Amino acid sequence: MASGTPGRMRPGSPGGTESADRVTDVFLLFAQADRPLGVSEIARSLSLSKAVVHRILQSLTSRSLTSIVSGNSTYVLGPAATTLSMKAWSQLDLRSLASPILRKLRDDTRETTTLSVLVGHQRIYLDQFESPQEVKMVVDVGPHFPLHSGASSRVILAHLPQSVIDNAVAELREIRPGVDVEDYRKRLENIREKGYGGSINERGTGAASIAAPFFDTAGNVLGSISSSGPVFRYGEEGHEDHVRLVIAAAKAITAELAKQRR
């Protein structure tokens, strides 16, 4: 810790120390939170003194594991935490697990298929299998995308806590002041009911997409898969078979993840 004081052994935590456990507890509290956290709230949640929490946050922030939110003295997970998250996905080897499912979906639809994962309050593409057709959609693997726009993002957002949805809607209103919030929330409800979402030329790029979420064994949304292509090959109606294939592929990934836990 930042104070340099050796930690004492903590009862019930074999092989650990009280200091190390406190740091871990604070870090995990951020992982479970859906909004920025302040010193007082962390102290109350973990029954720690504000002084101890402040020292822990100083240590975590110095290593970019947390970052302070300017203006209100609260904290969020930092860029180093995102790196850890990416490493965790790599070690889980989700790409290898999902690859045969995505490849088959690509072969069945002849459109580009993608694998996205939730990282903090954003989404990244982890993998893709490109369409064999001459005109196709290709995504950038690695960059972060907001949760409020695009089918791959919205199907994740629809299954997150209400506070995360509220924050995403607020972000969307900043860039699109005229957005119909009531209609947007109904679209999220529709995703939850039907198990998938779609987008048609949403960003003005000529792309269309059908996406569905996948989950861990506790029912927490982990990410999404999509089948995407140029908008002229998609339409508002007539894609029932395509939708069923995407939903089935997402469910197959959820089932494979469950097998890994056995």
Image: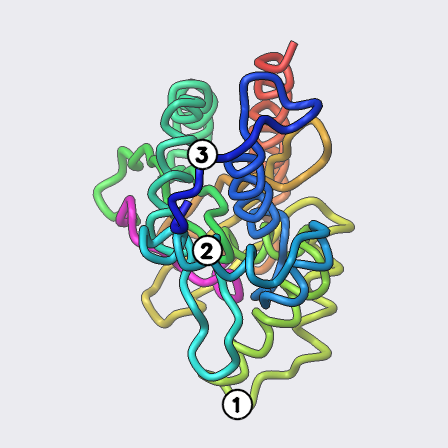
- Viewer-side label of 1, 2: 2
Judge the density around disc 3: few (<14), some (14-19), many (≥20) Cα neighbours within 10 Å: some
Q: Relative to the observer, which residue lies in front, 42 or 220?
A: 42
Q: Relative to the observer, which residue lies in front, 217 or 229?
A: 217
The stretch of residues the image draws in magenta is: 138-150
Residue kind at label 2, given as amino acid type: Leu
Q: Determine which of the numbered discs, if any, sits on residue 77 in the image.
A: 2
Judge the density around disc 2: few (<14), some (14-19), many (≥20) Cα neighbours within 10 Å: many
Image vertical order of residue 219 relative to residue 94, above or below:
below
Whole-percent x, y for residue 57 in the image = 47, 57
Whole-percent x, y for residue 112 in the image = 36, 39
Q: CA distance from mark 2 to mark 3?
A: 38 Å
What residue sits right under mark 1 in the picture? 177
Would residue 147 be counted in the magenta stretch?
yes
Q: Identify the image quadrant of the N terminus.
A: top left
Tell me which colouring the rendered structure shows: rainbow
Residue in the picture at 66% in, 53% down: 48
Q: CA distance from mark 3 to mark 1?
A: 36 Å
